[in-house]
């Protein structure tokens, strides 16, 4: 696995490779019967679509690749919606986006 040249903390690009932040864990909460993100001192309850997106955030797939994978599962997947969802989690420090440096 190659190391990223930089990490995005704001906008989400189709070529970015999202992954969960080190302190965040995606798990299924049996009591809530929902997937959740566990963070220090916080729990983020996810809907099925959010859980599907985050389940694909492995640091290898690009945002565009995640969108394509989701389009194979669901009828209507807008790239802008996936980018917006991920950007919100980047702002909350749940997700980081690795990007390759074009100069290297």
Image (spheres, rainbow, N blue to C red):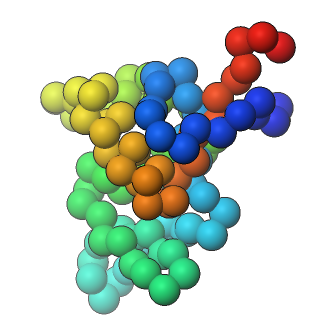
Horizontal arrangement in the rendering, residue 96 relative to residue 28 (left or right): right
In the rendered picture of this protein, how many numbered marks are placed on residues?
0
- Which x, y percent locates residue 81? 25, 35
The structure residue drawn at horizontal position 37% and vertical position 28%, both measured from the top left corner, is 67
Residue 69 vs residue 6, the one in the foreground: 6
User: Relative to 79, does residue 36 appear above or below in the rendering?
Assistant: below
Q: Position of residue 87 (x, y in %)?
A: 39, 43
Q: State which quadrant residue 98 falls in.
A: top right
Q: Is residue 22 left or right of residue 3?
A: left
Q: Is residue 83 visible?
A: yes
For the C terminus, the image quarter is top right
The vertical placement of 34 against 61, above or below, is below
| Left-right relation of 85 to 5 | left
* Quarter that holds the N terminus: top right
Q: Is residue 52 visible?
A: no
- Residue at image position (24%, 60%) is 47
Image location (x, y in percent) of residue 92: 44, 60
Q: From the viewer's perspective, is residue 1 above or below residue 89?
A: above
Residue at the image point whose x is 50% and y is 60% from the top: 94
Coordinates of residue 37 in the picture (x, y in percent): 44, 69
Residue projecting furthest to the top: 103
Nearest the viewer among 33 and 89 is 89
Q: Residue at x 54, y 44 (%)?
A: 9
């Amino acid at each position: 696995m190659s190391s990223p040249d930089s990490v995005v903390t704001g906008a989400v690009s189709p070529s970015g490779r999202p992954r969960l932040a080190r302190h965040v864990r995606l798990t299924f909460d049996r009591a809530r019967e929902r997937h959740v993100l566990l963070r220090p001192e916080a729990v983020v309850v996810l809907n099925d679509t959010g859980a599907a997106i985050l389940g694909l955030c492995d640091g290898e797939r690009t945002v565009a690749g995640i969108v394509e994978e989701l389009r194979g599962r669901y009828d209507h997947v807008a790239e802008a919606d996936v980018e917006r969802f991920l950007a919100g989690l980047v702002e909350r420090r749940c997700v980081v986006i690795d990007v390759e440096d074009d100069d290297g």
